[in-house]
Amino acid sequence: MTIINFTPLPALLGGSLIGLAAAFLLLAQGRVAGISGIAGGIIYPEDKNDISWRLMFVLGLVLGGFIYQWMGFGVGVGHIRAIVDTPLLIIGGLLVGIGTQIGTGCTSGHGICGLARRSPRSLVATLCFMGSAVVTVYVVRHLSGVA
Amino acid sequence: MSNLFRLLTALAAGTLLGLGLAVSQMIDPAKVLNFLDIFGNWDPSLAFVMAGGLAVNALITPFILKRQRPLLAEFFRLPLKVEIDKRIIIGGILFGIGWGLAGYCPGPIITSLSFIDRDILIVFIAFVVGTFASRWALAHTKNTA
């Protein structure tokens, strides 16, 4: 094992912004900042009167990406793109959608908000998706000989 | 009026979160996959994203929850379920496989739309289709969890 491209400071700073944003949503609206759950309520709504704030939140996520590029925070931000082929992108995106809805949460909802509240469900969910993601990358990169 | 504030705070929270995902490089699938590749050339950076986000959130959350109610809503809507069921395990594993294949989790999928890129649009559409299909299926089956 070799350590590569280690960037702890932007990671800590960005992570803190994520934690702060989630706390702000909780303070203002009493909502957990689970991105898959917020998006899910737009894509397949349970309550038609509960969509507008979700749309604004999702719009904000995209806006945050634009601001990052405009402000030139990232040198070489133009180089950020997908690194696997189209079939893997499709299967990956599908499984992320399916898995987060079945498991009621993703990296933000379970990994940040849930763990911060010491939810045992979120701990198990986080261990499951981290574990299966590590195994998946191991199989793809070291066993299959592809990628 | 309070509805306008609700929309604006949602926009602000989303913007701050999207900016955090970008600054932390969580939106770079190369970095995500190198982070997950703990048996290869390992990039531990994203552990610091988790740690930073978790630390800040865990520090502030108890103070917020001491309040009677949020600023702009009647009450806090927290997931109250504590029991570990099959759904949380199966869902978590499926999500992890998808994350490990493409290097995108839901936040970065949405924030990366700002790059206006064909590949990212493909992941986004697949995510939307997967989300719609599973929510439809969950709504149309008996709760077996």
Image (cartoon, coloured by chain):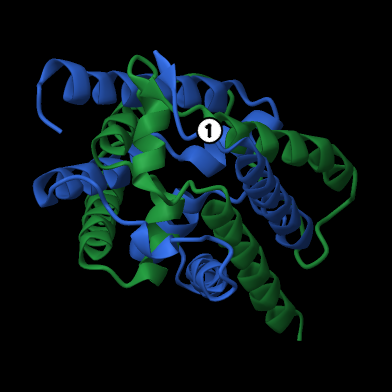
Residue to which mark 1 is pinned: A6
- Residue at the (10%, 22%) spot, across then down: A145
Q: Specify whether residue B88 is in view.
A: no
Horizontally, residue B9 falls left or right of residue A99, namely right
Residue A77 x/y as whole percent: 44, 62
Taking the view exactly as shown, the residue that stands out farthest to the bottom is B1
- Residue at the (44%, 61%) spot, across then down: A76
Horizontally, residue A131 falls left or right of residue B120, namely right
- Which quarter of the image is occupied by the N terminus of chain A? top left
Q: Colour of chain B?
A: green
- Residue at the (41%, 70%) spot, across then down: B114
**Chain letter, blue:** A
Q: Specify whether residue A99 is in view.
A: yes
Residue A131 x/y as whole percent: 38, 19
Residue B91 x/y as whole percent: 34, 31
Dividing the picture into quarters, in which one does residue B7 lie?
A: bottom right
Q: Secondary structure at mark 1?
A: loop
- Residue at the (39%, 18%) spot, across then down: B38
Chain for numbered disc 1: A
Q: At label 1, which amino acid type do we have?
A: Phe
